Image (cartoon, helix red, strand yellow):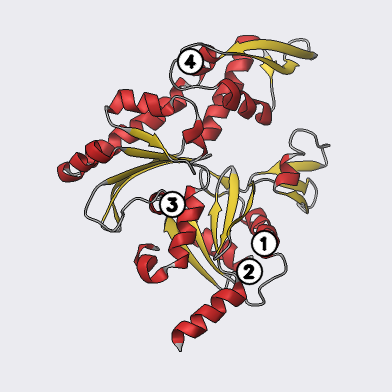
Amino acid sequence: MIDRITRFFSLASRDMAIDLGTANTLIYIKGEGIVLNEPSVVMVTERDNDVIAVGAEAKSMVGRTPDTIKTVRPMKDGVIADFKVAEEMLRYFINKARNGRGFIKPKIAVCVPSGITEVEKRAVRDSAEHAGAREVLLIQEPMAAAIGADLPIHTPTGNMVVDIGGGTTEVAVISLDGIVASNSVRVAGDEINEAIDQYLKKAYNLLVGEQTAEQIKLQIGTAYPLDEEETMTVKGRDLVVGIPKTQKVTSRELREATKEPVNSIVNVVLQTLEQTPPELSADIVDRGVILCGGGALLRGIDRLLNKETNLPIRVVENALTCIVEGTGRALDDLERYGKIFI
């Protein structure tokens, strides 16, 4: 009888898993899979903070708005930086994902960084509840990533996950449904973009927008030397004379420009390996390290980590979605995964 009631509530409410990321927010609905993947960006009025646009629509406006409208990224370093705007953004995304279906408030599972504080946990719970959740469950991102990557987290074997997101890099060694060793550094994709932006200013007096910096990273960014270095023509504004300017930039230059944030990511992986018990270290030598998150798609990051650790490194196929998929799977099977929620 209890199982029937639980199943009814689940179907009637359309329970969902949310990856509330610094760069993008993804939503997974039980039984349907990923139904939303949009930038974590909100456009608000300068005067009253009234919301103008959210998600993909807001991202398309970045760098193109008048002074009366400002860009707000309510998530910073994987946690909520602007409570009010985060709540508005969540409400918009939840309603869009539900698409008018489901007449009971949904149960929502949200993944959070492993280094999150109690205050930050409360902010996530409150935002989700105010946005329309009847119950909020929290799961640590490395654990969600491990489930999404099909790692055997229930067994007494060491599984190492490196999640390079937009605002944070999470590294964890998982065994027997728990995190044995973990570290988190608030350096990830956004800091790599910022390093590219700063390099272009210093080297060429060239000012580019944040979307252009990200585009450069995706097109010719690399963490490890290429067999044949690449070149890209970048468009921006000359900081000296103030007129539009184009400049050719090479992948070798960008590798040097982004060395500091990339090395921070490598160091947190090495630090976690040092803290790993010997028995689990032996497992990691055999099984290797799993990379996920948008930052894992930076070309050569796997080869660099392989060089520094001498371990097999694998970027999962669903690198961009494995965290929300793992959170969704855990929500789908609470009997099996219930104890891993915070």
Residue with the mark numbered 2: 132
> What is the spatial separation of the Cα atoms under label 1 and label 2, in whole angstroms?
7 Å
Q: Earlier in the sequence, mark 3 or mark 4?
A: 3
Report the residue at 57% width, 17% height from top. 199
Q: Label 1's element?
A: helix
* Residue placed most toward the observer, 150 or 164: 150
Residue type at mark 3 is: Gly
Residue 273 is situated, as x and y percent measured from the top left of the image, at 26, 37
**What residue is disc 3 on?**
148
The label on residue 178 is none
Mark 1 or mark 2, which has the lower sequence index?
1
- CA distance for labels 3 and 4: 33 Å
205 lies above or below 143: above
Q: Secondary structure at mark 2?
A: loop
Instruction: Estimate how packed mark 4 is, as few (under 14), some (14 to 19) or many (20 or more) residues with alpha carbons within 10 Å.
Output: some
Q: Nearer the viewer, residue 319 or 187?
A: 319
Q: Which residue is mark 1?
A: 91
Quadrant including the C terminus:
bottom left
Residue at screen point 48% across, 48% down: 322
- Mark 4 and mark 2: span between their CA atoms? 46 Å
Indicate left or right for 320 with 276 as reference.
right
Give x and y (percent) for residue 50. 78, 54
Residue found 73% across the figure and 19% down from its top: 236
Labels 3 and 1: the sequence-earlier one: 1
Location of residue 249 in the rendering, given as x and y in whole percent from the top left corner: 61, 12
Q: Amino acid at mark 4?
A: Glu
**Residue kind at label 2, given as amino acid type:** Gly
Please name the amino acid that badge 1 sits on.
Arg
Q: Which residue is mark 4?
A: 256
From this viewpoint, is residue 183 visible?
no
